[in-house]
Amino acid sequence: MTNLTPNSSFSVTLRLQIPNRVGMLASVTQAIASTGGNLGQIDLIAQNRQESIRDVTVDAASTEHAETIVQAVKELPDIQIIDVYDRTFNLHRGGKISIVSRIALKSVSDLAMAYTPGVGRICKAIAENPEEVYNLTIKQNTVAIVTDGSAVLGLGNLGPEAALPVMEGKAMLFKEFAGLDAFPICLDTQDADEIVKAVKNIAPVFGGVNLEDIAAPRCFEIEARLQAELNIPIFHDDQHGTAIVTLAALLNSLKLVQKSIGDVRIVINGAGAAGVAIARLLRKAGAETILMCDSKGIISTNRSDLTPEKLEFAVKAQGTLAGAVQGADVFIGVSAPGVLTPEMVQGMRKDAIVFAMANPIPEIQPELVPKNVAVMATGRSDYPNQINNVLAFPGVFRGALDCRARRITTNMCLEAANAIASLVNISDLNRQHIIPSVFDKRVASAVAAAVQQAAREEGICSN
């Protein structure tokens, strides 16, 4: 049996035929509870004098756990399982997004204006003044979500087809939280030159490009080259989105424990795209003592296997993660499940801050250290203080596209983090509330305003 917390990503609905006798439904709920399932909604589908048909929704902790729950119900006498629905698979069936026309075509005149021959006038106007593409097409409000499928979530190199569900979900978030139209572009190549070429070739359609789930160190090169060769904002969300939200959460956590970012000792475990971007943005925000670790321990100047990105944060110290964490104020994990132990946390300084953001299983389960940390955050929605990129990227692009920024700068990211942090009033700040909810409708507009202001101050806007 897994000891992970049941959650909706492993939610199933059991359609059951249940005799109309006292205690029969109770036997179902008891069987679910005895196997660790989290009972959700129960719907009555049909009923007669002899029996009822009900849909029973249950959250599990894994696919195997869901199968255990189903088996426990199956073994109940007189209870018949008609069907079992995996709710997550059902939600994705047929895809999650579609293209919808903004205008109705109800007459010949509508068609003549929207398409030929009237559209020819629009084409000529853009050819004569290319800047009109922002006013007369979808470009002003459209983002390309580009991936090569080489680093899909925490699952690894799954390829472009398997990456598509994530990119569809990203498009939904752009629309829901910032009103932006985004479309998945899953490229069937993992060659940096080919990716750069492909994105440059499709750039005329898009106001900005969100790079997603591209493995390090290739992602650093691709982002830098695209930003140098295109005049639209390029944003690698796994890097900068993660860094923005992490900094926002850290700023508020430090307020709680009354420590300064310049004084604390910060350990970052994970030196890929997210870890490097977090370290860079924390430095920009004033952090002075950062120890970065990878699977081989502290990133030390004595090592000969370091990438240029890792070399930025190499220190003279050597040792393991356990040694790095000893006496640290802050642990930030963007790495692997279970690498931080309760003993390591006990060795941290008083009022320790732990961000265990590996998904779906964090570096340490929060319930293992309830009394040893002042603030605990994860990347999961079923624990308090979820550090979720959706707090950042919709507003960042909304602001950048609205002022037609030519790029995303470190200062824009810094101001986005400050904007997110500011939405938690000091009177509401507590160890289980250091960051706004992803459903807080103020977030995207606040981030957009901050990003736009920063871009204007840097003089990189086109309008």
Image (cartoon, grey):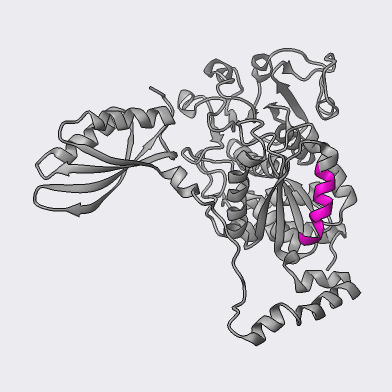
- 250 in magenta: no
Left or right for 215, reference 18: right
Q: Position of residue 441 (x, y in %)?
A: 55, 59
Q: Is residue 34 above or below residue 14?
A: above
- How many numbered markers are drawn? 0
Asked which quadrant contains residue 452, the reply is bottom right
Residue sitting nearer the eye, 326 or 301: 301
User: Residue 44, percent across and down?
Assistant: 23, 52
Is residue 63 toward the left or the right of residue 20 in the image? right
Q: Is residue 345 visible?
A: yes
Left or right of 92 in this view: 81: left
Q: Is residue 456 above or below residue 149?
A: below
Q: Which of 406/152 is in front?
A: 152
Verify whether residue 205 appears in magenta: yes
Magenta segment, principal secondary structure? helix
Where is residue 8, by image quadrant? Answer: top left
Q: Residue at x 83, y 53 (%)?
A: 201
Q: Percent from the top left, x then y, of residue 421?
A: 63, 48
Quadrant where the image shows the C terminus: bottom right
| Residue at left offset 71%, top offset 16% | 297
Residue 197 screen position, x and y as percent: 85, 46
Out of 37 and 302, give the one closest to the viewer.
37
Q: Is residue 409 visible?
A: no
User: 392 or 125: nearer the eye?
Assistant: 125
Where is residue 316, by image quadrant? top right
Q: From the image, which quarter does the N terminus lie in?
A: top left
User: Position of 296 compared to 371: left or right?
Assistant: right
Magenta region: 195-206
Identify which residue is drawn at 55% across, 29% down. Answer: 362
